[in-house]
Amino acid sequence: MTSGLEWVSTLAGSVPRWTVEPSIDVVAQLILPYLQQASTKISFLAEGGFNKLYNVQCIPPAVMRVSLPVYPGYKTASEVATLRLVAAKTDVPVPRVLAFDASKNPLGFEWILMQRMPGMQLGAQWASLDWEAKVSLVHRLADLMAQMFSRLRFPQIGNLFEENEHDTDGDSQNLIVGKIVSMAFFWNGRSTYEVPRGPFHSSRAWLESRLLLVSNDCEAILNNPDSDQDDVETAEDTKALVARLQRCLPNFFPDADEGKEHFVLCHEDISRQNILVDNSGRLTALVDWECVSVLPLWKACQFPSFLVGRNRETMPQRRDYFEDTEESGGQGVNELYNEHVAEHELTTLRGVFLQRIGQVQPQWVQIWRDPMARSRADVEIAIQYCDSEFCQKRINNWLDGLERGGESHSLRSRLMDGLGRTM
């Protein structure tokens, strides 16, 4: 347990839990000096994986985000540096940081006081938007991703930090790439493992370190005499799969790549939850910039997550989905109809996105279409899910195909079909 944080095992895996609730009174005392008013009212707003959000009634409106110490100091400091850079170098609408504290303080938790952005989550608006509004939004996001792709390049993989940790002016010129801040490196106590954490000079070094983290997880289970037998068997299977992935890395990331790769700041979760829009569907903000890292171009050139889904090129015909239903006493439309219509819509919008970003940033599409870039993305997905017993068989089958030298289908598609959801 670390300063209010406890990792708890559930059927879905380990999750962080608050053992101490932040004091709203202390929150008020901390932020009042940064507000241009004598008093304020603070109320609980929402809770995420390891954050609590509080609404701050002031002019202009603000939010206070309090974070669990999943990666003490680094996560908050990097997010602040990243927000300031994105605001300075691009047209992406992001919250302005009003104040923050990534060190020990009277609240007992790291915090950021930031501007509250207008709009509502895209997920709440999506169904009510017409086609033209959705296309316009996709165009806008493609333009902004193209800006990030061209303007936010760096020489290493890792996270951004102020060169002077005491810099409160947020000069975007004084940033450095430091150790990486991502869930793969700190989830469930991984922050204590002695593995390379960056900055990394190559994709291969980054992925090798991630495999070491999984290997350490396996050793912790195998060396614990109280481990459940099922956990031991899964750890043994995972360790064997890690070894296979370690052997295949040089085929996709040769030593000759060292010093020749390019890296870019990449927001990996441009989802309906993190896109804010107004009533007409116009973009008002892109939020949730914690754990946003500088990553390889082959990793960055992927569809935003709100557009990811199964391909369905042909528009479903309603007449093909009628079935007898007990509820209506006659024929009704199979529930798959709406699901398939949504898949077709996203498939079409992915084409809209590719056309737009290809117009403003052709290199992005060239990388996305490059077979080696796609293979590298598959290797990274294999590493991400190699410790999941639900994915291991498909990953092993995919590796079998690679080792036979035959054509291997996309691993992303295989896992998406197996898990029955988008990735």
Image (cartoon, rainbow, N blue to C red):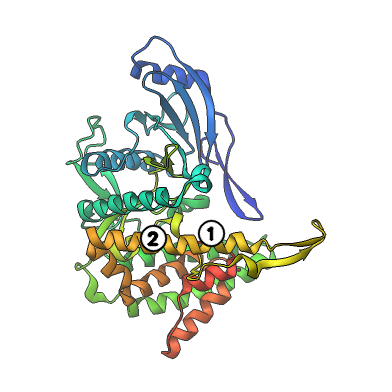
Picture coordinates of residue 349, whole percent (x, y) = 41, 60
Measure how far apart labels 1 and 2 are at the Cα level: 16 Å
Disc number at residue 342? 1
Query: Disc 1 on helix, strand or loop?
Result: helix
Q: Quadrant of residue 298?
A: bottom left
Disc number at residue 303? 2
Query: Disc 2 on helix, strand or loop?
Result: loop
Picture coordinates of residue 75, whole percent (x, y) = 39, 43
Disc with the residue nearer the chain's start (1 vs 2): 2
Which residue is drawn at the image coordinates 59% and 61% (left, top)? 339
Residue lying farthest left?
A: 173
Picture coordinates of residue 253, whole percent (x, y) = 31, 74
The amino acid marked with disc number 2 is Phe
Picture coordinates of residue 289, whole percent (x, y) = 38, 44
Q: Is residue 358 above or below residue 279?
A: below
> Could you tell me if residue 270 is visible in this image?
no
Horizontal side of residue 179 vs 394, given as left or right: left
